[in-house]
Image: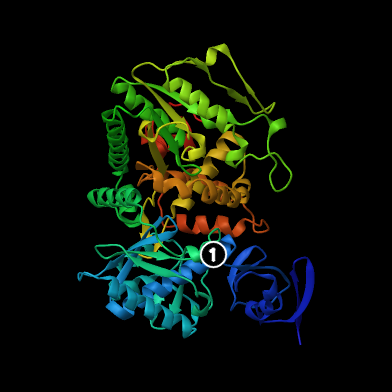
């Protein structure tokens, strides 16, 4: 009997040729916090029902890992789609990531209720308990298009017309065929933890467990500001007539994308001007606190907002929280015994409070400038600042919403602005470009342009970036006075021309290969857009270059 060697955790094991990953995983399950759900085989993600026929290196993943969690989410989406079909005989649209959930619309002409949602959840549980297999089948792309046209799923049929592959991989769950960008669990039994919460107007939030959240957080705290930003985003997409990548591709193929760029930029600028107007109408506001996750466009947003405030006669004074890092020699140590760089304890909050309080009291102060090379604050007479009648402080940083940073300042003097790119558009009803992927693409392009970093370098550090965001930024977004959406409906087409070549540089022996391939596969349905028509004050220029603002 033919044998193969499988390396797991730097140890080799002998298995019969054709043994499934599921059989192999049983030996290692006790080492994981939850059920092993997927595996990397020579850095390529594979379902557990895959039979291995040659020597390989295998890394098993559970739902507490990023790759395993994405597999879990796709499985949950499929079960939700199937349950809605069984209960209501209609489709769903998976639209946005929102807080710790996924914002979805149930596509029926009849209004649903909380009772309806409970019926859907019951059906989802039945599907999970039935341990239904989820199997992959390879079909002709043309046959897949014909099938989806026959069942009136034109969103999928039309998106596949922009794929050049002769064949595609579909997944089968009972009587349902679907197409997902990424691997799914081998059966429904792995999706044991989830929740569905009713919002309104046939909108629900699907709540999966994320790798950075505890199970008990499968609840949704409604954030009206964020939901308002989502509604505004969906309305603007509807007005543009671009709801999926298909409509965007059509505008690219008929060379009308220039107008899409100009309309998108105008609408985004108008929204920021509305926020500036709201700030100036409240005479008590003396401080604008700006925060948001990595690659949201904080630098451009803060500079644009300052310009709009100047249009209204105000004198913005920019302040970076990073300049209030404590000196490296005095810094508290992290869990690895190294100087802390992320937590609020790394900053001199007492000094920050005092400086800001003095400024609000009309005093002249010298603001520090942090020297990152020498690891210490520096003070220069040229950094003297004094507020005038129309002065307003623009404070930007990861901890801008943390109350300990501004505990001495009255709440009435603060305006909190949370910025993030919402999902720019869907590929089809069941596949969306996540805002985390959108930000990652921005980051890959910028890191390569400004630091010479490879796509693999950025992919490697992205997990740590996400962990920091979830710990120090996302919990505070509910405190925002306004949420500003920095996504642009056309940007994926522009980012493709910059990011796709970088992603192809990640070879198949790289641990980040599967992450790169996931992004490449999603790019397959987006046509590229040249950047010539992107204005130099666009948030996108912060990442692709040639911005009129000084960005870092």
Q: Residue at x 45, y 45 (%)?
A: 495
Q: Does residue 488 sit above or below 66 in this rendering? A: above
The count of marks equals: 1
Q: Residue at x 47, y 71 (%)?
A: 75
Q: Does residue 396 sit above or below 131 in this rendering? A: above
Residue found farthest to the bottom = 1
Q: Position of residue 237 (x, y in %)?
A: 28, 50
Mark 1 closeness class: few <14, some 14–19, many ≥20 residues within 10 Å: many
Q: Position of residue 184 (x, y in %)?
A: 51, 71
Q: Residue at x 63, y 69 (%)?
A: 33
Q: Which residue was labeled with disc 1?
A: 69
Quadrant of image for the N terminus = bottom right
Q: Does residue 117 sit above or below 440 in this rendering? A: below
Q: Residue at x 39, y 57 (%)?
A: 221
Q: Position of residue 87 (x, y in %)?
A: 30, 79
Which structural element holds mark 1?
A: helix
């Amino acid at each position: 009997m033919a044998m193969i060697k499988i390396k797991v955790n730097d140890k080799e094991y002998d298995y019969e040729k054709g043994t499934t990953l599921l059989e192999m995983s049983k030996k290692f399950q006790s080492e994981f916090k939850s059920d092993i759900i997927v595996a990397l085989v020579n850095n390529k993600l594979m379902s557990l029902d895959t039979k291995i026929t040659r020597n390989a290196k295998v890394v098993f993943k559970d739902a507490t890992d990023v790759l395993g969690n994405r597999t879990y989410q796709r499985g949950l989406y499929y079960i939700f789609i199937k349950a809605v079909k069984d209960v209501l005989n209609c489709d769903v649209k998976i639209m946005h990531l929102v807080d710790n959930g996924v914002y979805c619309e149930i596509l029926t002409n009849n209004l649903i209720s909380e009772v309806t949602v409970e019926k859907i959840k019951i059906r989802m549980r039945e599907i999970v308990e039935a341990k239904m297999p989820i199997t992959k089948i390879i079909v002709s792309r043309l046959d897949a298009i014909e099938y989806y046209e026959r069942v009136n799923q034109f969103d999928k049929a039309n998106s596949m017309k922009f794929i050049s592959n002769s064949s595609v991989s579909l997944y089968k769950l009972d009587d349902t065929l679907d197409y997902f960008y990424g691997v799914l669990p081998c059966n429904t039994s792995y999706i044991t933890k989830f929740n569905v919460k009713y919002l309104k107007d046939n909108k629900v939030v699907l709540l999966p467990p994320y790798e950075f959240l505890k199970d008990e957080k499968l609840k949704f705290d409604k954030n009206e500001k964020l939901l308002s930003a989502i509604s505004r985003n969906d309305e603007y997409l509807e007005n543009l007539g671009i709801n999926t990548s298909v409509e965007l591709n059509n505008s690219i193929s008929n060379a009308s994308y220039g107008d899409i760029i100009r309309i998108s930029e105008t609408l985004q600028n108008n929204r920021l001007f509305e926020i500036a107007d709201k700030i100036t109408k409240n005479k008590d506001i003396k401080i604008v606190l700006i925060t948001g996750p990595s690659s949201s466009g904080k630098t451009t947003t803060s500079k644009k907002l300052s310009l709009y405030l100047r249009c209204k006669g105000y004198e913005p004074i920019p302040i970076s929280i990073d300049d209030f890092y404590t000196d490296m020699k005095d810094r508290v140590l992290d869990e690895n015994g190294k100087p802390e760089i992320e937590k609020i304890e790394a900053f001199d909050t007492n000094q920050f409070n005092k400086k800001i309080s003095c400024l609000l009291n009309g005093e002249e102060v010298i603001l520090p400038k942090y020297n990152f090379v020498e690891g210490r604050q520096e003070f220069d007479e040229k950094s003297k600042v004094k507020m005038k009648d129309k002065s307003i402080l623009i404070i930007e940083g990861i901890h801008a919403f943390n109350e300990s940073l501004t505990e001495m300042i009255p709440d009435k003097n603060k305006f909190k602005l949370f910025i993030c790119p919402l999902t720019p558009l869907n590929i089809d009803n069941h596949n969306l470009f996540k805002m985390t992927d959108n930000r990652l693409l921005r980051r890959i392009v910028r890191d390569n342009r400004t630091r010479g970093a490879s796509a693999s370098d950025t992919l490697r550090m992205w997990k740590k970036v996400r962990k920091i965001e979830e710990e120090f930024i996302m919990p505070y977004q509910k405190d925002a006075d306004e949420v500003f959406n920095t996504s642009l409906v056309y940007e994926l087409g522009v980012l493709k021309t910059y990011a796709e070549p970088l992603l192809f540089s990640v070879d198949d022996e790289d641990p980040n290969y599967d992450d790169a391939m996931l992004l490449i596969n999603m790019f397959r349905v987006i046509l590229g857009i040249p950047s010539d028509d992107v204005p130099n004050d666009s948030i996108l220029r912060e990442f692709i270059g040639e911005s009129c603002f000084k960005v870092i």
